[in-house]
Amino acid sequence: MAYLLLIIGLVILISGANVLVIGASSFAKKFNIPNLVIGLTIVSFGTSFPELIINILAGYKGQSDLAIGNIIGSNIVNILLVVGVSALVRPLRVQSNTVKFEIPFSILAVLVLFVLANDILFDGAQLTILSRSDGIILLAFFLIFIYYTFIIGKHGNADEGHQVKVLANWKSFLYMLTGIIALYFGGLLIVDNATIIALNLGLSEAVIGILVIALGTSLPELATSVVAAYKGNADMAVGNVVGSNIFNVFFVLGISVTLSPISFNSILNTDMLAALIASILLFIFVFTRKGRQIDRVEGSVFIALYLGYVIWLLV
């Protein structure tokens, strides 16, 4: 029953995020906000809402390993699996802004988290806590990223990007309300049943967060990227994945620890290292082989690394 409820929770959570994005995008369009800006902000927020809800609930329940494992795991899945599988379908071109700013910023995100999460290592403290002040630091970096996003939107084509369906005001509000309710109850089902599954399998909450929940919340991005690659429209696939990773660390974790400080288990440093290596490899692969794209060979390397990482976690 716990497995079934976890799957139901994932479906409700992801559906809620999609419905919320539809309603919020419709409202934004009525205020004449360009499609490009809507795609870079509201839609990006929407893809991070599942991780945000899970982290807030896990933080309040004291399940810190689940919360941090969810963030680190999502970042690993996004690069090694989403980019890897999409590149197998069709080589992914990488935009210049993604290379110059977004990928380095995603690497910085992991490094900042590593420093903030290791009070024992850097300060000689007895215990590591991601405190409210750490959350504020993460959110400050996030504001820098949002500023950059609006600059990109200002200089881009206003009609490019996310296509918005304009709804009646009451329908937009209903979509948003439904989405928020679904996010809450879906997240509750996931957090509660993930704990039960971890106990039954003898696995830690961190492993469940990294393997099961992170993979589940990344399935929509995987499906979207694969379909876009198949149709030859995957130019922004890498940028979307990198943007999601930045949102996860600076926005999701920033909000959740600001609301409810959580402890950090130093055993997760190994997984953080895996996320850092994945981000660095993404940056390196852009300049290797055929230049400014992730081709099928590099995609295969990403998938092989992900499978190796999963086996290492389980063994």
Image (cartoon, rainbow, N blue to C red):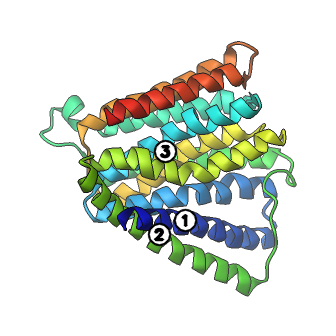
Secondary structure type for disc 2:
helix
First in sequence, mark 2 or 3: give its number: 3
- Residue 239 vertical position relative to residue 88 in the rendered view, above or below: below
Residue 270: where, in percent of width, then height?
Answer: 33, 30
Instruction: Identify the residue under disc 3.
Output: 74
Q: Disc 3 residue type? A: Ser
- State the count of labels: 3
> Residue drawn at (25%, 60%), measured in percent from left and top?
62
Number of other residues with Cα within 10 Å of mark 2, as a class: few under 14, some 14 to 19, many 20 or more: many
Secondary structure type for disc 1:
helix
- Residue 5 vertical position relative to residue 227 in the rendered view, above or below: below
Name the disc covering residue 186, or none. 2
- The reply to whether dot 1 and dot 2 touch (C-beta < 8 Å) is yes
Looking at the image, the residue that sits furthest to the front is: 1
First in sequence, mark 1 or 2: give its number: 1
Name the disc covering residue 11, or none. 1
Quadrant where the C terminus is found in the figure: top left
Q: Disc 2 residue type? A: Gly
Callout in the foreground (1, 3):
1
Secondary structure type for disc 3:
helix
